Image (spheres, rainbow, N blue to C red):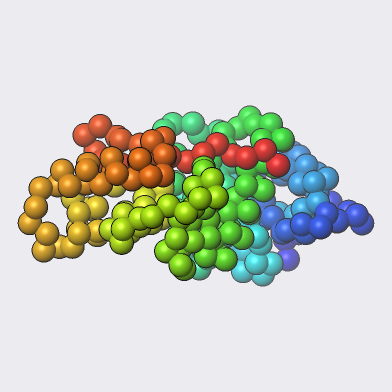
Amino acid sequence: MYIHPYPKTTIMSAEGYKILIVEDDDSIADFLGVTLRSNGFETHWASDGEKALDLFREVAPDAVLLDLNLPKLEGGEVLRWIRQESQVPVIVVSVRDDERDKVALLELGADDFVTKPFSARELVARIRTNLRHKVVAEAGRTEVGELSIDFHRAEVFRKGVKVILSRQEFEFLRLLHENRHRVLSRSFLVERVWGYDFDGDERVVDTAVKRLRRKVGAGLIETVRGRGYRMQSPAADEA
C-alpha cells in the first residue's frame, strides 16, 4: 500500500476528500502533501504510474493530481486507464506548457491542467472547484458562468431566471458542455442535433449559436475560426 509518509493530521476539515498525488519527485510530493493536508484533505501518494493505478483502485480517491513524466507508466497512459474506470476529476500538474500537449490531455479526459511552478493557493482553488463540479454533476446539475443547467429536467436558469430553450437548443447546449474542452465542428453539431438525414445548410448551426448567445450570454460560446464552436470555461473559482 503506497501511502504518503506524512501522517494524517488529527484535525480534519469537514470536506475530508481523498486526493491521490501521482508524482515521482519526492520534494514536490512532500510539498503537495503538506499543502493539501493543511487545507483539510486526506492525501495518498504514488511515485510511478503502475503504483498510481493500484492505489487508485485501492483508495477510490475523490480527485487525482497527475504528473506526466512518470516511471513505469507515463502519465498520459495512467489518465487513459483511469478514464476507462471512472470520471473522477483528474488535474494534470506538469512542466509541459505546450498548447498541443494541453489540448491532447484535455481530450483524453483531463479536467484541468496546472503548469509547474504553481502557487499552492491556485492549486487548492482548482481542486475545490473541480470537486464542486463533480458533486453538482452527480446531482444532475452543473453551474457554468451565469447558468445553472439541470440535465435531468432539461431546464436552464440564468442568474436564477428560467431560460426557455427549444429541444434542439438544449441538446446543442448539452453537447457543448459535455465536450467543453473540444472544438465541435458544424458537421458534428448538425449530425448530433438535427440528425444524419438533415439535408439543409450547415449555416443552421450559426443561426442556432446566435439564438443561444442571446439567451445564455454572448461570452459562453466561443467561435473558433475555420473549425467550429466550443464552450468557454470560466476561470477556477477562489475557494
Q: Horizontal and vertical percent for residue 205? A: 21, 46
Identify which residue is drawn at 35% across, 36% down: 222
| Residue 100 seen in the figure | no
Front residue (pair 238, 34) = 238
Identify which residue is drawn at 17% across, 47% down: 204
Identify which residue is drawn at 42% across, 52% down: 163
Front residue (pair 23, 85) = 85
Q: Horizontal and vertical percent for residue 49? A: 57, 55
| Residue 204 seen in the figure | yes
Image: 150 above or below 124: below
Image: 32 above or below 225: below
> Which quadrant of the structure image shows residue 223?
top left
Q: Horizontal and vertical percent for residue 153? A: 46, 67
Q: Horizontal and vertical percent for residue 114? A: 57, 37
**Relative horizontal placement of residue 59, taking residue 145 as reference (left or right):** right
**Relative horizontal placement of residue 126, taking residue 229 as reference (left or right):** right
Q: Quadrant of the N terminus?
A: bottom right
Image: 66 above or below 99: below
Image: 61 above or below 40: below
> Which quadrant of the structure image shows residue 99?
top left
Identify which residue is drawn at 24% across, 52% down: 189
Count numbered badges in the picture: 0
> Which quadrant of the structure image shows residue 35?
top right
